Image: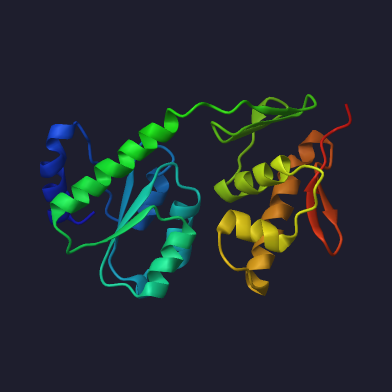
C-alpha cells in the first residue's frame, strides 16, 4: 500500500484491533501471500495498463482471503476484468479513507460470517480420494494435494454433478461466470488436464473425457 494511505487507514481502524502489514510490490505480496495469515488483501493498483495481468492473476485466482483493489480511474471493461479474475471489491484511491475503512470492515465481517456457516461434510471416494468443501482441501492417499482455486472449483463442480457429462462451455460459465470463447475454452481444458494429472496418483481415472461432449466425474464402484 502507499505509505500515506496506509497511515491514514491504520489510524481510522486502530480502534478495531486490526493489524495492517504493508508490502511495497505485487511480487512481494505474491511471495508472502500464502505464508502470512490474513483476513483481507488490499491491492493498490497504480496503473492498470502497465501492470501485467499475469502478476495480478495468481493473487486474485488463488487468494486465501478477500481482495480489495484500490485503483486510479478504470474503464468499465477493466473493472469487469478484475471482478472476473476474482476481485472482491473495487474502490478509487481518491475515495475518503473512512469509506475505505468501512469497506475493509465489511469484507472482514463477511468472511467471518462465512467461516461460521455450517460446515459441509467431506466427500470420500474409495480409500484414495477425499474432498473437503468446507476447508477446500483435496487429499490423495491421506496427503494434501497442491491444487489451485480454479482446479478445486472444477473438481467440486464435477463431483456434485457426478455421472453427468458437463460441457467445456458449462464448466467455464459455472466456474468463471463469463461467456466463453475459443481461448477461454482452452483454459478449461488446460485446468482439467492438470487436475487429472494431479489425481493420477490414485491409480484411477476419476475425471473422464467424453469426446466431443465434455467431462464427467466417475466415482469408484462400491
Provide residue 103's location: percent of width, then percent of height: 25, 48
Query: Looking at the image, which residue sits at the far right?
Result: 221
Q: Is residue 51 left or right of residue 103?
A: right
Q: Is residue 207 above or below residue 180?
A: above
Q: How many marks?
A: 0
Q: Residue at image x 77%, y 42%?
A: 162
Where's the C terminus, which quadrant? Answer: top right
Q: Is residue 52 visible?
A: no
Instruction: Please identify the quarter of the rendering in which residue 87 is found.
Output: bottom left
Q: Judge by depth and name the residue closer to the eye, 146 or 152.
A: 152
Q: Is residue 54 visible?
A: yes
Q: Residue at image x 65%, y 63%?
A: 187
Provide residue 209's location: percent of width, then percent of height: 83, 54
Provide residue 37's location: percent of width, then percent of height: 37, 34
Q: Is residue 64 above or below residue 115?
A: below
Q: Residue at image x 44%, y 52%?
A: 59
Provide residue 78's location: percent of width, then percent of height: 40, 71
Q: Is residue 51 above or below residue 24?
A: below
Q: Residue at image x 50%, y 26%?
A: 118
Instruction: Please identify the quarter of the rendering in which residue 206 is found.
Output: top right
Amino acid at each position: 500500500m502507499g505509505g500515506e494511505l496506509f497511515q491514514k487507514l491504520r489510524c481510522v481502524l486502530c480502534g478495531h484491533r486490526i493489524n495492517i502489514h504493508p508490502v511495497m510490490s505485487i511480487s512481494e505480496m505474491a511471495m508472502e501471500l500464502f505464508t502470512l495469515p490474513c483476513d483481507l488483501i488490499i491491492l493498490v493498483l497504480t496503473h492498470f495498463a502497465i501492470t501485467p495481468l499475469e502478476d495480478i492473476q495468481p493473487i486474485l485466482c488463488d487468494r486465501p482471503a478477500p481482495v480489495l483493489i484500490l485503483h486510479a480511474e478504470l474503464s468499465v471493461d477493466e473493472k469487469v476484468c478484475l471482478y472476473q479474475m476474482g476481485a472482491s471489491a473495487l474502490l478509487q484511491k481518491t475515495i475518503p479513507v473512512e469509506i475505505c475503512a468501512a469497506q475493509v470492515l465489511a469484507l472482514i465481517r463477511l468472511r467471518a460470517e462465512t467461516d461460521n456457516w455450517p460446515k459441509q461434510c467431506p466427500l470420500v471416494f474409495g480409500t484414495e480420494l477425499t474432498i473437503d468443501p468446507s476447508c477446500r482441501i483435496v487429499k490423495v492417499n491421506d496427503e494434501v494435494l497442491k491444487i489451485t482455486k480454479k482446479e478445486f472449483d472444477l473438481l467440486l463442480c464435477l463431483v456434485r454433478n457426478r455421472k453427468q457429462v458437463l460441457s467445456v462451455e458449462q464448466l467455464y460459465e459455472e466456474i468463471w461466470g463469463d461467456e466463453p470463447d475459443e481461448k477461454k475454452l482452452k483454459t478449461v481444458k488446460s485446468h482439467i488436464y492438470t487436475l487429472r494429472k494431479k489425481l493420477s496418483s490414485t491409480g484411477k481415472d476419476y475425471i473422464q473425457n467424453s469426446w466431443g461432449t465434455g467431462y464427467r466425474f466417475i466415482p469408484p464402484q462400491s
